[in-house]
Image: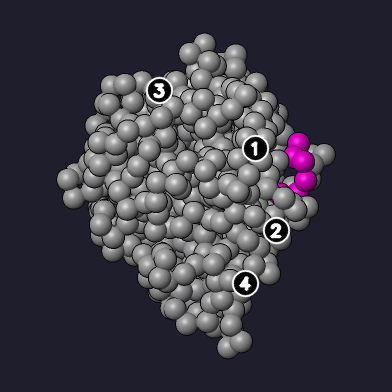
Amino acid sequence: MVHQGNTPFHPNLAEIGLRKARNIWWNLPPARLIERTLLAGEGRLTSTGAIAVDTGRFTGRSPKDRFIVRDPLTQDNVWWGEINQPIDPEQAKTLHGDLMRYLDGKGLYVRDAFVGSAKEYRKGVRVMTEKAWSNLFAFNMFLRPTKEEIAGFRPDWHVVCAPGFKADPTRHGTRQSNFAILDFTHKRVLIGGTGYTGEIKKGMFSAMNFLLPTESNVLPMHCSANEGPDGKTAVFFGLSGTGKTTLSSDPERQLIGDDEHGWGPRGIFNFEGGCYAKTIDLDAALEPDIYGAIHHGAMLENIGFAADGVTPDFTDATTTQNTRVSYPIQHIHGAKPSGEGGHPEHIFFLTCDAFGVLPPLARLDAPTAAYHFISGYTAKVAGTEDGIDEPKAVFSACFGAPFLPLHPGKYADMLSQRMAEHGSKVWLVNTGWTGGPHGEGQRMSLKDTRALLNAVLQGKMDQVEYRQCDRFGWEVPMTAPGVDDTLLNPRNTWADPRAYDAKADALADRFNANFDPFADGVSAEVRNAAPTVPAYAG
């Protein structure tokens, strides 16, 4: 349904505080949204058929500008701190009112969608955007209702995205002019002052991370997931740059989802209807599924171009390292239409260890898995951000700290319970460096990583011997099909084993320092799974 021109104002928008609008474009198809983006001079068609846009000043999320309204519903439930910053209800109400007045009389793009492919847990979301391309992102990333579902659609939540609206920190209680605010009492996400589209999907992911555990005892997960020909599923946790999207996009397996899932009584289910992949250094040979998904309907963000001005240059990081593409999941050949799967047989924790310390594969018992789930470790390498001139350890609880309203121990307990109930096995996979840290060693080859994953998924790693790592507590295989045995023991790949020990001890200390704030919220068994610093660890 499309309302525009002098068409009467739609009453369903009055419930969020809008009173009038000059034009309302309701559930426009992608071609119309692309057309309107081009007419506004806010995008360009590329040689791939995809549209490319620049999101403006912000090319990534702004975690310090994310707030949760502190009210009776959240007061005693949210784990408040630097990640979950409170905002006063009255200031949030003032900001909402000012935002609605800003949008009144303007053109507005409205989209009805769902979050959660399992119908018993899904939420209806009405996304209202100032920009056509923001609405295209919502079309790509959220689940698209059928015509019958649209006819009777009633939203559970509203998401409002207005890049042109600037907050007043004094009046509104924000840190600066941009913001992303979750209001659980009024069931809305307010986004302003930023055009970065990821705020739209992560706003609802944060909401689901609060709602599902408290309302339905469903575990929300920041992970990708796929399913093998045998019907068995696997999930892949990992921070940006660890290979989560790449490794789950396997031509031999059906993709269930790219980034956000729930684990309920029937198994796992995708929250989304699309993928939001990084494109920096995208290579058709190494990542054919993602590369092939970039065609009409896909939307590229903040990329560079070849000299002709229309051919994407995925090596160009002039604007940002965080170049992205969004596309409907159907752009991936073999994606599973239902977005649902059984209980995962295998769980992979992906890390890009730039220190060259961690093994390419290790098996974790339940307490060790809980400890490393809460730790959520990876590393940034030199050159990825201003001021980083050597590897830097990065910890993000449950591999998604910026989106977790509850104490990470809650999510870790839920994961442990499901592991025990369904016999899921947990593995650490290092996609980072071996033979030394970044700048001295070399990156794990995608070929070796895929060989190790395939060996696990095919049950071949149940037939090999393991040794326990004295330092980190996990079990490291002695051999693996198709992989050089030397690679499996990281200490053996270093020219100087003592240098390895020093680097590993330093990383273990970083783990322990990071875990201190979480210790009071977990069991003694999990606390005892912390790394130790032995005189020698092989």
State how the image is colored. one colour
Q: Position of residue 306 (x, y in %)?
A: 59, 82
Say whether marks 3 and 4 touch (CB < 8 Å): no
Q: Residue furthest right?
A: 170
Q: Nearer the viewer, mark 2 or mark 1?
A: 1
- 537 falls in the magenta region: no
Q: Earlier in the sequence, mark 2 or mark 1?
A: 2
The residue singled out by tag 4 in the image is 316
Q: Earlier in the sequence, mark 3 or mark 4?
A: 4
Q: Which range is magenta? A: 173-180
Q: Which mark is residue 383?
A: 2
User: What amino acid is at disc 1?
Assistant: Arg
Say whether marks 2 and 3 touch (CB < 8 Å): no
User: What amino acid is at disc 4?
Assistant: Asp
User: What amino acid is at disc 2?
Assistant: Gly
Q: Nearer the viewer, mark 4 or mark 2?
A: 2
Is 478 in front, or is 409?
Answer: 478
User: What amino acid is at disc 3?
Assistant: Ala
The N terminus appears in which quarter of the rendering?
Answer: bottom left
Q: Residues within 10 Å of mark 3 (few under 14, many from 20)?
A: some
Q: Is residue 341 visible?
A: no
Q: Reply above or below: 468 against 400.
A: above
The residue singled out by tag 3 in the image is 366
Looking at the rendered structure, the secondary structure element under dot 2 is loop
Q: Which residue is drawn at the image coordinates 33% and 62% (left, top)?
A: 332
Q: Earlier in the sequence, mark 4 or mark 2?
A: 4
Q: Which residue is drawn at the image coordinates 51% and 20% (left, top)?
A: 529
Is 254 in front, or is 199?
Answer: 254
